[in-house]
């Protein structure tokens, strides 16, 4: 197969290669003209969608900057996802909270 189109960054695929496997056809001017906002098409469903940060109530936390030894941070990061919450839990336990 001869590649005539410019290659996309980094992977060696051409635009023609990507177009050949794309499930998304190009949108036409007519498609844009008949497009409507989601809330206009599905008003009841749009009312149920919550946007932004969730309300946190009694579990509110304070964001701050804290400088810790690199060894401490490395040890917690090695424990995987949720390491910040584990630091919080350990601090609560140390303070008897």
Image (spheres, rainbow, N blue to C red):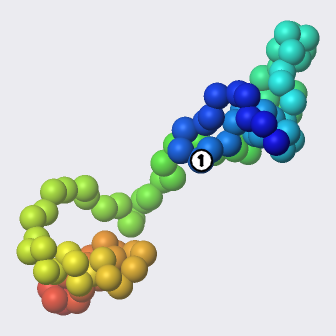
Q: Residue at x 83, y 24 (%)?
A: 26
Query: Helix, strand, or loop for circle 1?
Result: loop
Q: Quadrant of the N terminus?
A: top right
* Left or right of 28 in this view: 39: left
Q: Residue at x 35, y 85 (%)?
A: 79
Q: Residue at x 87, y 30 (%)?
A: 25
How busy is the neighbourhood of tag 1: few (under 14 within 10 Å), some, or many (20 plus)?
A: few
Q: Which residue is mark 1?
A: 11
| The image quarter in which residue 77 lies | bottom left
Using the image as rendered, state which of residue 83 and residue 75 is in the foreground: 75
Q: Residue 91 at what x, y percent from top left?
A: 20, 81
Q: Quadrant of the C terminus?
A: bottom left
Total labels: the figure holds: 1
| The image quarter in which residue 74 lies | bottom left
Q: Tell me: residue 70, above or below residue 94.
A: above
**Residue 46 visible, this angle:** no
* Left or right of 40 in this view: 30: right
Q: Tell me: residue 23, above or below residue 65.
A: above
Q: Tell me: residue 93, above or below residue 51.
A: below
Q: Residue at x 9, y 65 (%)?
A: 67
Q: Residue 22 at what x, y percent from top left?
A: 82, 40
């Amino acid at each position: 197969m001869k590649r005539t189109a410019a290659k996309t960054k980094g992977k060696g695929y051409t635009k023609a290669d990507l177009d050949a496997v794309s499930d998304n056809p190009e949108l036409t001017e007519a498609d844009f003209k008949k497009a409507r906002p989601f809330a206009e098409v599905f008003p009841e469903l749009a009312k149920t969608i919550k946007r932004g940060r969730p309300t946190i109530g009694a579990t509110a936390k304070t964001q701050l900057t804290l400088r810790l030894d690199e060894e401490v941070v490395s040890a917690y990061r090695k424990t995987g996802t949720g390491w910040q919450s584990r630091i919080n839990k350990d601090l609560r336990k140390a303070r008897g909270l």
